[in-house]
Image (cartoon, helix red, strand yellow):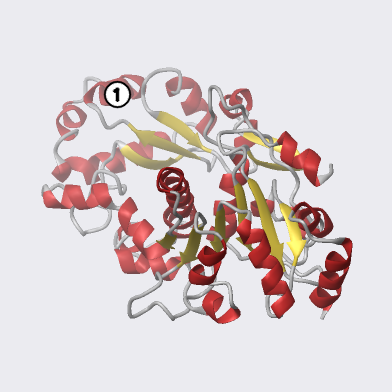
Amino acid sequence: MSQNGLAAARRGPLSGIRVVELAGIGPAPFCGMLLADLGADVVRVDRPGGRQAGNPLSPELDLLNRSRRSIALNLKTPSGVAALLRLVAGADALIEGFRPGVAERLGFGPEVCTRRNPRLVYGRMTGWGQDGPNAARAGHDINYIALTGALDAIGPPGLPPVAPLNLLGDFGGGGMLLALGLVAALLEARISGRGQVVDAAIVDGTALLTTMIHAMRAQGIWSDDRGSNLLDGGAHFYGVYECACGGYLSVGAIEPQFYRRLLDGLGLAGDPEFQAGHTDPARWPTLRARLRELFRTRTRDEWCALLAADDTCVAPVLPMAEAPQHPHNRQRGTFTELGGIVQPSPAPRFSRSGETAPNRPPLPGQHTGEVLAEAGFTEEEIEMLGGAAAR
């Protein structure tokens, strides 16, 4: 599909929003994917020569780059920077994920870009933020969430904390919060006529995600002793249990009515120890041990057949390969298949704006000519930029 055709096909609440994304890895492209999934026209600026940040060996499999166009510019050359600034002049937002000061040094920092386009929303994605003692230091998801207290709270007692993949920092506290910040700033720019810089730091976003835990600590109902609390596996009615088949079952019967239904389903409704133990943390370890033995008497699917039909707050723990086949996920279309690759569908859903379907990740530089022509570049300028990009 040509770029004009791709742009025309974009639906969703952000249809008509133009975003320039400077190639990066992790949270910044996740933010670009979110905006593109919601209908924005996102143009990714990749490195020249077919090189790509993220997954250079198989760029067509780098799902974080889906639903955009890609152009190749050498941003270490004056001509490449000049071309970028011409694109910025017609954009609503820009996304960059460099270390603090790099964009300024290369000639396309916020001050330069907003002189070209005063309405531009300039999104900056970093781990530590644009300032602070750690701002210039390297790091990854695990380092950022460690500094917020979030990592220390995850994992079994008596063992090291468990890294929650890179979902909590890179994507939850990072790319997701940058996307929210960009949309908020875009809304404000429509009122004020002025853009601004969005400083999205993973350490800030991850700390924000722990707000409820801080509230529970302030109320005296959360302990820093991991594995002793309501939501960290301490409560016998909120956790994961191994079944006879080696699979796992998640249990989350927090409220009294759901706890009663769980006990009914397990045949424990008349057990005084379980009845008294719902609100007594001192009993939780003993009750957890009893449930651990009970759940090992049936397979995961047998427990699901017995419990999942009622409000027991029980669900199977599905491996990623199995999750797309679950009847609920299939009926809702939670996952989709594109080019033989199963992947999560765009979310959330909108009643009026229409749903977007993802497009395949582009090859680096695949749409260079189309995008530059749309921006008013002549054929001669496009050809010259192609030569400059190759250098």
Identify the secondary structure beneath mark 1: helix
Task: State the image quarter where residue 385 is shown.
Answer: bottom right
Q: Quadrant of the N terminus?
A: top right
Task: State the image quarter where residue 131 is shown.
Answer: bottom left
Q: Position of residue 44 (x, y in %)?
A: 68, 58
Number of marks? 1
Could one spot residue 231 in this view of the protein? yes
Task: State the image quarter where residue 330 is shown.
Answer: top right
Q: Position of residue 74 (x, y in %)?
A: 73, 74
Q: Which residue is mark 1?
A: 258
Q: Is the residue 28 above or below the residue 336 in the image?
A: below
Q: Judge left or right: residue 28 versus residue 211.
A: right
Q: Judge left or right: residue 321 versus residue 257.
A: right
Q: Quadrant of the C terminus?
A: bottom right
Q: Residue at x 51, y 26 (%)?
A: 302
Q: Residue at x 40, y 72 (%)?
A: 130
Task: Give the camera-side residue of 159 and 191.
Answer: 191
Task: Give the camera-side residue of 329 and 24.
Answer: 24
Task: Give the camera-side residue of 75 and 192.
Answer: 192
Q: Residues within 10 Å of mark 1 (few under 14, many from 20)?
A: some
Q: Judge left or right: residue 3 versus residue 67.
A: right
Q: Is the residue 331 above or below the residue 294 in the image?
A: above
Residue type at the position of mark 1 = Phe
Q: Judge left or right: residue 152 versus residue 383.
A: left
Q: Position of residue 257 (x, y in %)?
A: 25, 21
Task: Give the camera-side residue of 95 and 51.
Answer: 95
Q: Is the residue 291 above or below the residue 91 in the image?
A: above
Q: Is the residue 3 above or below the residue 143 in the image?
A: above
Could one spot residue 299 in this view of the protein? no
Q: Position of residue 333 (x, y in %)?
A: 63, 28
